[in-house]
Image: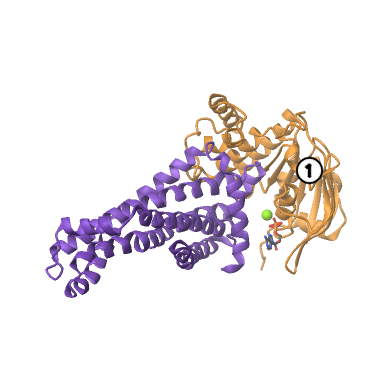
Amino acid sequence: MFQNIGEMVVLFWRTLMALPLTWRQRGKVFDQLFEIGNASLLMVCILSFFIGGVIALQTGPVLVERGLASAVGGVVGIAICKELSPVLMAVLIAGRIGSAMAAEIGSMRVYQEIDALRTMNISPIHYLVLPRLVAIATALPMLVIFSILVAWLGGALVCLSNDRIAISFASYFMNLNDVVAIKDVANGVFKSFVFALIIGVVSCQQGLITRGGPRGIGRSVTKAVVNSIVLIVILDYILTRVLLR
Amino acid sequence: MNTASRTNGGVGLKVKGLCKSFASLEVLRDINLEVKPGEIFVLMGPSGSGKSVLLRHLVGLEVPDAGEILLDGQAIQGEGVLSGYRLAMVFQSGGLLNSLSVGENIGLYLSEHRLKSPEEIERIVAEKLDVVGLRGTENKMPSELSGGMRKRAAIARALVIEPQLILYDEPTSELDPLSSVVVAEEIVRLNDRIGVTSLVVSHDRQLAFGIADRIAVIHEGQIVTVGAAKEVEQSTDPLVKEFLSAGYKRATT
Ligand SMILES: Nc1ncnc2c1ncn2[C@@H]1O[C@H](COP(=O)(O)OP(=O)(O)O)[C@@H](O)[C@H]1O
Ligand SMILES: [Mg+2]
């Protein structure tokens, strides 16, 4: 996967250079945004709710036993917004949207649609990559904000209903409010923005270098998803280290 | 773009010493070819002889290992030369974008480069569809068209560019005989009407002898003969003779 990094950087750079053309391509950006929202909103909702729930379930009893019931809201709140929502939503979107991007661009490559674009002097970067990258870089951070809220709520419900934790909504959210600063949420959202760029660039690049018929498309899709996830996890560590100060 | 040469009429094409290998596979070996402005030139040859690869070089989709491609005497590798001419290629499979309707496909060049207003594009699309006999299919998706219709739609898309050189990759393969005739007539009509230079790649002998001003035969990446249809027909080269006279023989017992 690492031999493609150079090409990915070039693709990213050329897409950045094309950013002024975004307004022209706004129709396609909206199409992509709709596609992303449509395909993932329900899944984000369900996934986030259970992530919040399970984190509360794992940490709640341990803290309560040690007399730290008042810390549960803060622990769950921080874990969700700084780490779990950004990373898991990125993985979800890599699987749901990154794969679709690689498959779509890959099949356009295999069936000579991209060659046709180039003979018409239409740049595949302007026409295909730019709208996708702009859309995913806008959509993922918004999905992550949504996911954080749903996951907090999931955590609260579990804390309330589980009798080994048994913390009221009020004290859960009070503690959460004390511990979690806006900066922490911003931190997570920023990470998700970087992850979105990774998913977009990796998937589009894999799509563009697809060769060898339908099997090649399958290979590109797999590589797009796997490479995105690996890079997300590695970059997650690096970004967390940098943002930790 | 495309301000350099708004004159109509065909452009001359010259290929000099073109070589191309993929890994260890030598696909084109020293191709020399000249297509005169406004003529219909047919390149014939068996499958795998490098015809499509040659066409891809002419529109800049492949970079030659050696040799030159000249449009009106200017090398296409030069900055802005390729985009200064209006070239169009009709791909073997049509190359229509499956995510767009037929009308959007045909108007794509104009809408992406913002050359015309939406209303004008609509009018031009309808007009070009009419030319290729596909009136009223604007809102169909490419997947709803038959192979022959897709190919004609691809020709319509090429027409919108008002090309000076148009390249056809196997325009009649996969078509029934009737559609083949329609497409062949279309190629000739276009050539007459706008004087576009046409380079047709095909292994269809009937098409070649039906429409060509001149014919070349390519074999394993080398041009074995070039000439007017009559000359090629009477060629004594064994490879050419074999290719032109191949036919089905029923075993007799
Ligand atoms: N991108 C490529 N990579 C490797 N080999 C290729 C590529 N494109 C074409 N070839 C090979 O070049 C040869 C000529 O192909 P082509 O020009 O498509 O033949 P045809 O004359 O039937 O159009 C074939 O052997 C094909 O396998
Ligand atoms: Mg071919």
Callout 1: chain: B
| Tag 1 residue | B41
Asked if residue B220 is positioned above or below residue A123 in the image, the reply reads below
Q: Which quadrant would the N terminus of chain B be assigned to in this image? A: top right
Rendered-image quarter of ligand 2: bottom right
> Between A141 and A109, which is closer to the camera in this rendering?
A141
> Can you give x and y, in whole percent of width and height, for residue A204 in the image?
54, 55
Q: Is residue A215 left or right of residue B28?
A: left
Asked if residue A54 is positioned above or below residue B185 in the image, the reply reads below
Q: 10 Å neighbourhood of mark 1: few (<14), some, or many (≥20)?
A: many
Quadrant in the rendering for residue A151: bottom left
Quadrant in the rendering for residue B150: top right
Label 1 sits on a secondary structure element that is: strand
Residue located 59% across and 63% down the image: A5
> Can you give x and y, in whole percent of width and height, for residue B116 in the image?
60, 27
> Can you give x and y, in whole percent of width and height, for residue B20 in the image?
77, 60
Q: How is the image coloured?
A: by chain
Q: Is residue B188 left or right of residue A60?
A: right
Please state which amino acid type lies under the numbered disc 1.
Phe
Residue located 14% across and 71% down the image: A164
- Among all residues in the image, which is located at the extreme left? A163
Q: In the rendered image of this protein, which colour is used for chain B?
A: orange
Q: In the rendered image of this protein, which colour is used for chain A?
A: purple
Q: Which quadrant would the C terminus of chain B be assigned to in this image? A: bottom right
Q: Is residue B95 visible?
A: no
> Between B64 and A32, which is closer to the camera in this rendering?
A32
Numbered label tally: 1
